[in-house]
Image (tube, helix red, strand yellow):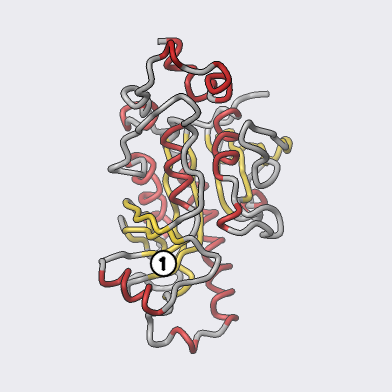
């Protein structure tokens, strides 16, 4: 099978967008278990892509139940060099209105129960994560957003919370006092694992609502939220099409050499079982 160039993480409807030519669906098993759903393989904007419904078809997997390692590992073995993520977020600032799109550039971690590294079991690695998103891929998303005329914000801090419950009012106010911009439940582990797998990663954050801090929060009707979600999905599809048509990030971004100085364990001490499990990640180092 021909390798894909991009992975796309989002809702199950994204691979139904106009212009997508599906070729097949692949259900994978990884050393870390099964991904959320079969990967939908096809062509969009002239690129070979693999779509994955993050929460599974029909949205049946909680954020804290997601097998992040299997999802990212699956993209790696399919050949993806970059991952575009699309996800709904709450806004922690008045200027980030429902219906807006934000391309975040930073994270704060408030999760507690999630495996977020491929390493361990005899092989230690510490990847640099000061800048958690690929700047080249972020730039492509921002340019595509501006072409569509959508209200788009360049940069923002994404607080990744555990969930599945939403924030208390005290927590929401605390995050605002810290200067946070957005709140969601999924993207941080994806970004960490993509960095370890030497893949570019960027997020299209779709604002659906103000978090509970907002004085009008309790008066919002569910129909309004659903309308915003539908509009966001349509905008995201167009932005992804335009992003894929842009030049692919190259090694200059640094993402694809993230393990160069990160693996600390001496190579002759790597346990064979761990080496085998991580072969897709370690192959470039072993060839050098």
Quadrant of the frame with the C terminus: top left
Q: Which residue matches tag 1? A: 100
Tell me what residue is drawn at x 37 percent, y 74 percent: 172
Element at label 1 = loop
Q: Where, by quadrant of the figure, is residue 130 drawn?
A: top left
Q: Nearer the viewer, residue 286 or 45?
A: 286
Q: Where, by quadrant of the figure, is residue 168 drawn?
A: bottom left
Q: Nearer the viewer, residue 260 or 229?
A: 260
Pointer 1 local density, CA inside 10 Å: few below 14, some 14–19, many at least 20: many
Quadrant of the frame with the N terminus: top right
Tell me what residue is drawn at x 60 percent, y 34 percent: 74
Tell me what residue is drawn at x 35 percent, y 32 percent: 126
Above or below for 120 versus 95: above
Q: Position of residue 90 (x, y in %)?
A: 44, 69
Above or below for 228 versus 145: below
- In the current view of this chain or complex, which residue is farthest to the bottom? 219
Q: How many marks?
A: 1
Above or below for 89 versus 5: below
Give left or right: position of 130 versus 73: left
Give left or right: position of 17 versus 194: right
Tell me what residue is drawn at x 45 percent, y 84 percent: 217
Q: Position of residue 183 (x, y in %)?
A: 41, 64
Q: Position of residue 128 (x, y in %)?
A: 31, 35
Q: Position of residue 69 (x, y in %)?
A: 55, 40
């Amino acid at each position: 099978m021909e390798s894909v160039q991009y992975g796309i993480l989002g809702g199950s409807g994204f691979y139904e967008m106009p212009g997508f030519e599906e070729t097949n669906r692949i259900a994978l098993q990884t050393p870390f278990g099964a991904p959320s759903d079969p990967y939908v393989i096809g062509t969009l904007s002239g690129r070979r892509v693999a779509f994955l419904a993050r929460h599974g078809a029909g949205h049946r997997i909680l954020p804290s139940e997601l097998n992040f390692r299997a999802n990212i590992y699956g993209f790696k073995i399919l050949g993806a060099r970059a991952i575009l993520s699309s996800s709904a977020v709450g806004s922690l600032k008045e200027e980030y209105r429902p219906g807006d799109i934000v391309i975040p550039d930073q994270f704060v971690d408030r999760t507690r129960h999630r495996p977020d590294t491929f390493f361990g079991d005899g092989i230690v690695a510490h990847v640099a994560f000061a800048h958690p998103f690929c700047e080249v891929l972020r730039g492509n998303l921002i340019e595509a957003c501006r072409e569509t005329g959508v209200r788009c914000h360049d940069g923002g801090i994404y607080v990744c919370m555990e969930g599945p419950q939403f924030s208390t009012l005290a927590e929401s106010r605390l995050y605002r006092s810290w200067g946070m911009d957005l709140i969601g439940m999924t993207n941080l582990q994806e970004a960490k694992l993509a960095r370890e797998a030497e893949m570019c990663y960027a997020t299209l954050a779709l604002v659906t609502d103000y978090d509970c801090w907002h004085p009008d929060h309790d008066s919002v009707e569910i129909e309004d939220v659903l309308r915003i979600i539908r509009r966001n999905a349509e905008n995201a599809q167009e932005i992804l099409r335009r992003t894929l048509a842009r030049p692919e990030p190259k090694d200059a971004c640094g993402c694809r050499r993230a393990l160069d100085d990160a693996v600390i364990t001496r190579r002759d001490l790597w346990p064979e079982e761990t080496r085998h499990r991580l072969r897709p990640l370690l192959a470039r180092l072993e060839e050098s």
